[in-house]
Image: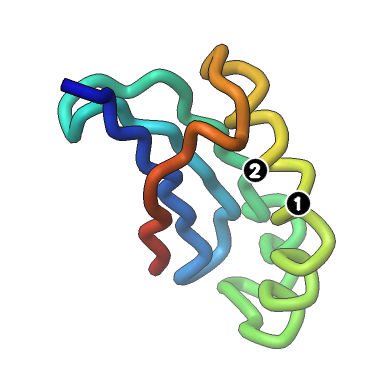
Amino acid sequence: MKDIYILGIETSCDETSASIVKNGREVLSNIISSQIDLHKEYGGVVPEIASRKHVELIIPVINEAIRSSGIDKDMISAVGVT
């Protein structure tokens, strides 16, 4: 049976993250870029600032998740996003 690789992307609040999961059970990579220091001076998350930072970080985070997983991007079967 062919292995299934899922790219998971999370950007629902103040962290930009991406993971590669094999066959729904084995996490091959999990890359997280936190914005906690960026929002600290405001006393909480500022959605406009968070969304702009996600745009800046999403491609590098995804690329690092794929690189550190050891698979080729063409092997990704599906993408899950929050």
Residue 28 versus residue 36 in the image, above or below: above
| Label 2 close to label 1 by CB (< 8 Å) | yes
Label 1: how many Cα within 10 Å (few below 14, some 14–19, many 20+)? few
- Quarter of the image where one finds residue 61: top right
Q: Left or right: where does residue 22 sit relative to residue 7?
A: left
**Residue 9, percent across and down?**
48, 54
Secondary-structure class at tag 1: helix
| Residue placed furthest toward the top | 70
Q: Quadrant of the N terminus?
A: top left
* Way the structure is coloured: rainbow
Residue 65 versus residue 38 in the image, above or below: above
Residue 30 versus residue 62 in the image, above or below: above
Task: Quickly name the residue at label 2.
Answer: 62
Residue 73 versus residue 34 in the image, above or below: above
Q: Left or right: where does residue 11 sit relative to residue 4?
A: right
**Residue 75, percent across and down?**
49, 32
Label 2: how many Cα within 10 Å (few below 14, some 14–19, many 20+)? many
Whole-number angstrom distance, CA of label 2 to CA of label 1:
5 Å
Which one is in front, 40 or 50?
50
Residue at image location 27% in from the left, 24% down from the top: 3
Q: Quadrant of the C terminus?
A: bottom left
Q: Left or right: where does residue 40 sit relative to residue 14?
A: right
- Quarter of the image where one finds residue 16: bottom right
Residue 59: assigned label: 1
**Residue 76, percent across and down?**
47, 39
Residue at image location 41% in from the left, 64% down from the top: 81
Secondary-structure class at tag 2: helix
